[in-house]
Image (cartoon, rainbow, N blue to C red):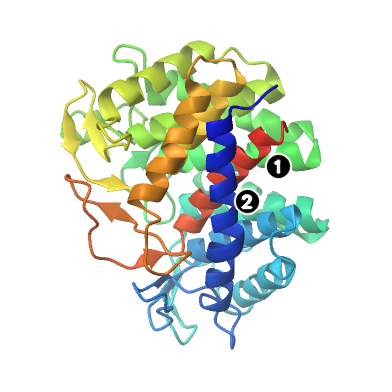
Amino acid sequence: MTVSAPLIQATEKFAHWMQTYALPLWQQQGIESSSGASTECMNALGKAEFAQDRRTRVQARQMFTYAVAYELGWCAQGQGIVTAIQHYLDNHATHPQYPGAYVFKLDAAHQVVDNSLDTYDCAFFLLAWSYQFRAFGDTCAKLRAERLLALLDSTFKTTTGGWLEGSLGGTRRQNPHMHLFEALLAWYEASGEAKWLARAAEIFSLFELKFFSHQHGVLYEYFHQDLSPLSFAQGQAVEPGHHMEWVWLLRRYQMFSDAPVSAYCDTLYQRGIQFGQDCNGLLFDEVNHLGQVTKASKRLWTVTELIKAHLAEARMGRPGAELAAAKAINALFEHHLNCPVPGLYIERLDEHNQPLAQSAPATSMYHLMMACVEAFSYCQNK
């Protein structure tokens, strides 16, 4: 496969930014030396805001980021960073009621301020541990993952399909299931064990039967307890970024299982672009099932998912997808990575694509790393 020059150039720029600026910045400024924990965010000067409360999902996402960086040879200290974060969690955040899980949030003094358990967060621990297993050969990570998945099954799995939101309940969403799907596929790839792919198949069935609207050709976000879509405006909410994320995930599932996903990917991809993309190549945060824009702001993560979807479709031979991936990387740089502090990023834009003043959340490093690795692997023909 010959990769186009525009994509090679854009990917080289992306990988250089990640290796030279982003990873060193978040390592040097974003890891608390006394505890090993990651900061929640950085201010516009590139200084960590360690005084803020710390969500454990941030720790999980940064473990993922540095495990991947270590595996690629992009950060020699990656294993030490991941080990320190894991120790921090084990020392301060273990859940008193749910063995094998972690509380939702700690304060700056490492005291628990919210001990709820969130299914969405659990998905990211499963993902992080899959990369600890494949990058470091950490068999303890596999035991952790098996224990946590068993806990989710025994505590939050429902007879109507899927898992509840967590200990606090609430409106059900497709989003935690999407990330559990991602984590299960990552475990299958890391271990080669069929049990992980079989669990992923359960979520694919939920996508087909519950999350995807065959009538409108869109992915719904919010559901009643029986996973029927909410009947008011929230139930018609569609996130173009999640359309793109599912395209990438479904193509991965197809690669492992030969499942027939092309019709879904075609619809999600085309509708996501048709309804969700502005004239600058960015994705709106939210539209409705008819394609009307309901939130014209734009988040950084939506561009990274757009990059991944273009690359997934390019692998399948979709005309123009490779060039579209290059354009999306360039749009990411133009609108989100053009910061005075190299390695920092702009998290959110308003409806006019102007930056909204806010700190850069550490959670977005997961999205950036995943998109960068996908582009890098594509250009390496992997």
In the image, is 46 to the left or to the right of 215? right
Where residue 153 sits: x, y (%)?
58, 44
Where residue 145 sits: x, y (%)?
68, 52
Does residue 151 show up?
Answer: no
Quadrant hosting residue 286: top left
Which residue in the protein does label 1 denote? 187
Q: CB under 8 Å between callouts 2 and 1?
A: yes
Where residue 191 sits: x, y (%)?
79, 41
- Vertical arrangement, residue 345 with respect to residue 154, above or below: below
| Residue pictured at 17% horizontal, 26% vertical | 292
Which residue in the protein does label 2 denote? 126
Q: Amino acid at mark 1?
A: Trp
- Vertical arrangement, residue 325 with respect to residue 125, above or below: above
| Residue pictured at 62% horizontal, 45% vertical | 373
Sequence-wise, which precedes: disc 2 or disc 1? 2
Q: Amino acid at mark 2?
A: Leu
| Residue pictured at 67% horizontal, 57% vertical | 69
